[in-house]
Amino acid sequence: MNKVLASSVEKPDISIIVSVYNEEDSLELFFNAISQTMAKKENYQYEIICVDDGSTDDTFQILQKFAQNDYRIKVLKFSRNFGKEYGLMAGLKYCSGRAAIPIDVDLQDPPELILTFIEKWEEGFDMVYGIRNDRASDTLLKRLTAKLFYKTYNLMTRSPIPYNAGDYRLIDRKIIDTILELPERNIFMKGIFGWTGFKSCGVKYVRRKRVAGISKWNYWKLWNFALDGITASTTLPLRIWTYLGSLLSFLGLLYALYIIIRTITYGIDVPGYASLLVFILLVGGIQMIILGILGEYIGRIFIEVKRRPLYIVEKKVNLDNDEK
């Protein structure tokens, strides 16, 4: 990338946001790809907000070197690993463009799609999201679990998210300002994007393989991420167990009446311990599931009421001391 000084940079039209964690092998390829893509939009000024989410390799040092040669590259370094959702929120908070585009550094989401995003934005859409039309680069298990998550989530929430739409999208400034007004600590960005509404459209693309490095997401992290997404966006799981509890109570009342009538008619019948034990275990298991779901929501209430900051910024590069 050619050296770009602060004096030659105007207020950006587009803020490209990338949250990175131990991605030292991908950074140069990423910056080159963004530079080549944005060169096709010469009338658009841009900045790249890089959030180092507590990397333990040389990611931050490499980011600093790129930022020294190009003032459009701006870096936030977290004091530890807070998570991708908080990195994205920090990028939105510090960006100054008229629109923002979150993207992954691994280039699985093609940078050239940014040009299509901008075209749709110019047509009047406030949000333009990428739809992964082909996920052949993912494993079969990941594709199946992703499909199950989207279906389950959309059945439970009043603000569904488009199937196979990730964080890769263009977001207008008015949506950014709306998101930054939200006080919540439990963040699920896909759900927040869907909740905001506004005029939106999707653009299909083929998801590629990583250009370098390895994914930091395993199935356990994805499971917890999905659980956070559902509990952060809807209370339907609590309502389901209210209905189920009412149904079980009604069935229990009917069974009690049956036992009373049978005892009065035929006398005391000793057999039935096995069926009674099965029933007790079944109800006990359901109660434990209910308590677990209650615990998930109570835990999130606990996090909310502590009002801790979403993240801690340790260092800034090419950014003013005050947040944008």
Image (cartoon, rainbow, N blue to C red):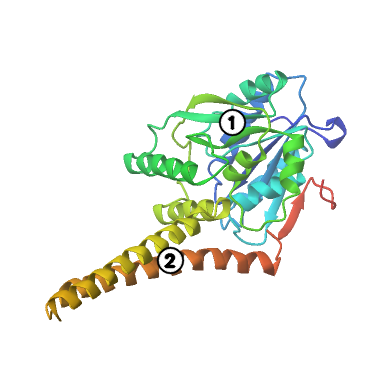
Which residue lies at the image location 72% right of the left edge and 58% below the top edge?
313
Residue 71: in sight, yes or no?
yes
261 w.r.t. 133: above or below: below
**Which sits in the foreground, 41 or 61?**
41
Q: Where is residue 296 in the image (x, y as percent from the top left)?
A: 51, 64
232 w.r.t. 35: above or below: below
Give the residue number, with chain letter if any, for mark 1.
Answer: 129
Residue type at numbered disc 2: Ile
Give the residue number, with chain letter if any, for mark 2.
Answer: 290
Say which quadrant the C terminus sits in: top right
Residue type at numbered disc 1: Tyr
**Which sits in the foreground, 9 or 12?**
12
Residue 5's image quarter? top right
Left or right, 51 with respect to 243, comes to right
Q: Where is residue 218 in the image (x, y as percent from the top left)?
A: 42, 52
Disc 2/disc 1 C-alpha distance (Å): 36 Å
Which residue lies at the image location 38% right of the left edge and 39% below the top edge?
143
Q: Where is residue 315 in the image (x, y as percent from the top left)?
A: 74, 56
